[in-house]
């Protein structure tokens, strides 16, 4: 015999009650579809780590249909528990009914979260491709957990960099995020957006071989051009000399887009003179698999009077 909608609901939602209920009594039950609440709470809590699977949530509902308490089974992952409780508290309910009177009650509510996105292609090759072109020389290394929002099309829509990430790592992660492709998360056979955590390891000592051929940038300016930059940028009527290290970003066209002082000389005028000099220089851009790319690297120069 075909089940009525109420009978089908009761088959999925268990009633927590100390005694048997009369035929005309009803347990508390959701007054709306759960999926919107599940996706909303999932988006909030999965930003801090994976939230997936099914949780049997115990919800207490008062005689006006308001949730008054939620509980998850002992041992439930903290993030998953918080997301499930968010769902339980965010829903509207019909109150329990006994002898035609609304009364407080409880129900066991199964909360199903989306599956996790999964990578379409090996992560290692993407990291090797994107590891900054200057890393082969300086052997930059580091690990991080990249938290990202993956869209329904399987592309990264947003990502969160951890505190303390180094500039070279920021550049490499941007390249990785732009190239990643996922099989998107799904909820009841429907693709949905989802946050995911992806461990990244930039480690050339342990992984010395690149899948991509990379060439670091090189200075292209002639000696006369360099001297002219010093004449134009060095402060007039000064004679001091300082060796200052900068971090520069070189565009695919070989120009210095950005220059930052790594170790200040103690003389702001000399620090700024060095930035002016670097911005006046031209470079042979870094190349990845034969294509010019933007790169960032440390570049020390001697800031001195022209001569």
Image (tube, rainbow, N blue to C red):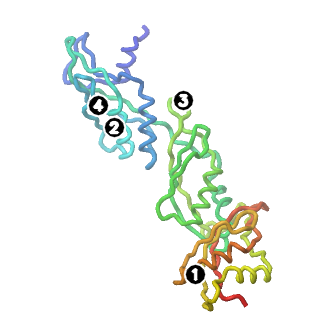
**SS under mark 2:** helix
How many residues crowd around disc 4 within 10 Å: few (fewer than 14), some, or many (20 or more)? many
Q: Where is residue 175 in the image (x, y as percent from the top left)?
A: 64, 56
Q: Quadrant of residue 42?
A: top left
The Cα–Cα distance between marks 2 and 3, rounded to whole angstroms, is 23 Å
How many residues crowd around disc 3 within 10 Å: few (fewer than 14), some, or many (20 or more)? few
For the point 75% across and 72% down, which residue is it? 282
Q: Residue 85: give its label.
A: 2
Relative depth, front residue between 73 and 284? 284
Question: Sequence order check: which comes first, mark 4 or mark 2?
Answer: 4
The Cα–Cα distance between marks 4 and 1, rounded to whole angstroms, is 66 Å
Foreground mark, 2 or 3, reads: 2
**SS under mark 1:** helix
How many residues crowd around disc 2 within 10 Å: few (fewer than 14), some, or many (20 or more)? many
Q: In which quarter of the image is residue 283?
A: bottom right
Q: Residue 189: give its label.
A: 3
How many residues crowd around disc 1 within 10 Å: few (fewer than 14), some, or many (20 or more)? few
**SS under mark 3:** loop
Q: Split into 4 quadrants, where in the image is the C terminus? A: bottom right
Residue 189 appears left or right of 282:
left
Q: From the viewer's perspective, is residue 173 above or below residue 259? A: above
The Cα–Cα distance between marks 3 and 4, rounded to whole angstroms, is 26 Å
Q: Name the residue under label 1.
A: 269
The Cα–Cα distance between marks 1 and 3, rounded to whole angstroms, is 63 Å
Q: Where is residue 219 in the image (x, y as percent from the top left)?
A: 75, 75
Question: Sequence order check: which comes first, mark 1 or mark 3?
Answer: 3
Q: Residue 59: give its label.
A: 4
């Amino acid at each position: 015999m075909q089940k009525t909608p109420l009978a089908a609901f009761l088959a999925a939602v268990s009633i927590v009650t100390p005694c048997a209920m009369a035929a005309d009594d009803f347990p508390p039950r959701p007054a709306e579809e759960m999926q919107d609440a599940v996706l909303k709470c999932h988006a909030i809590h999965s930003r801090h780590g994976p939230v997936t699977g099914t949780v049997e949530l115990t919800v207490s509902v008062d005689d006006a249909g308001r949730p008054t308490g939620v509980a998850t089974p002992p041992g439930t992952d903290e993030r998953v528990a918080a997301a499930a409780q968010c769902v339980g508290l965010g829903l509207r309910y019909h109150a329990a009914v006994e002898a035609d009177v609304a009364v407080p009650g409880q129900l066991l509510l199964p909360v199903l979260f989306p599956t996790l996105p999964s990578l379409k292609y090996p992560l290692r090759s993407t990291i090797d491709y994107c590891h900054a072109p200057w890393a082969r020389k300086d052997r930059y290394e580091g690990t991080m957990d990249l938290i990202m929002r993956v869209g329904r099309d399987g592309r990264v829509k947003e990502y969160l960099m951890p505190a303390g990430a180094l500039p070279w790592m920021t550049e490499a992660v941007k390249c990785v995020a732009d190239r990643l492709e996922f099989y998107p998360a799904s909820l009841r056979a429907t693709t949905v957006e989802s946050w995911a955590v992806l461990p990244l390891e930039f480690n050339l000592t342990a992984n010395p071989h690149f899948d991509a051929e990379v060439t670091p940038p090189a200075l292209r300016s002639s000696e006369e051009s360099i001297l002219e930059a010093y004449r134009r940028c060095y402060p007039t009527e000064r004679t001091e000399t300082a060796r200052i290290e900068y971090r520069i970003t070189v565009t695919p066209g070989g120009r210095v887009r950005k220059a930052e002082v790594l170790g200040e000389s103690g003389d702001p005028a000399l620090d700024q003179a060095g930035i002016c000099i670097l911005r006046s220089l031209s470079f042979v851009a870094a190349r990845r698999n034969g294509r010019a790319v933007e790169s960032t690297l440390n570049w020390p120069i001697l800031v001195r009077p022209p001569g």
